[in-house]
Image (tube, helix red, strand yellow):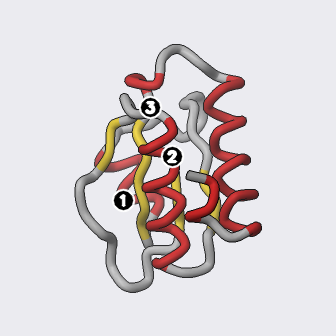
Amino acid sequence: MRKMLDANEFQIATVLRNYMLANWVTDSEWYVGITNDIERRLFDKHKVDETNGKYSIVNAGTLASADKIERYLLKTYSNLKEHHGLGANDSTFVYI
């Protein structure tokens, strides 16, 4: 599975994974997604508390990298919730 990511993508996936593991309940309590608008997706749509909620956001740089990181995390943690679709062309943020 690691082979699907380049070194930078793997580092980003590791940051997100480590945050999730440090705040672990179960993987089904987490959602992974990609977006171009953190405010809209994370705080408005998912209703995450911006001050007290548990979340991590990393800019992957490109939609292709964000998508690969998201798919990697979904394969690694099969119970993660997901958005079932590719983001807009400028969706470079990966969040959990």
Which amino acid is tagged 1? Arg
Check disc 2 and report its element: helix, strand or loop. Answer: helix
Q: Would you place residue 94 above or below residue 23 in this image?
A: below
Compare residues 60 and 43 and report the one nearer the observer.
Answer: 60
Q: Are marks 3 and 2 in contact (CB under 8 Å)?
A: no
* Residue identifier under label 1: 40
Could you tell me which residue is drawn at 47 percent across and 34 percent down?
A: 77
The crowding category of the residue bearing disc 2, from other C-alpha atoms within 10 Å (few below 14, some 14 to 19, many at least 20), is some
Compare residues 31 and 4 and report the one nearer the observer.
Answer: 4
Does residue 55 appear left or right of residue 80 in this picture? right
* Residue identifier under label 3: 30
- Mark found first going from the N terminus, 1 or 2: 1
- Mark found first going from the N terminus, 1 or 3: 3
Whole-number angstrom distance, CA of label 1 to CA of label 3: 18 Å
Check disc 3 and report its element: helix, strand or loop. Answer: loop
* Callout in the foreground (1, 3): 3
Which amino acid is tagged 2? Leu
Tell me the tag on residue 73: 2
Query: Quadrant of residue 88 in the image?
Result: bottom left
Whole-number angstrom distance, CA of label 1 to CA of label 2: 22 Å
Q: Would you place residue 4 above or below residue 43 in this image?
A: below
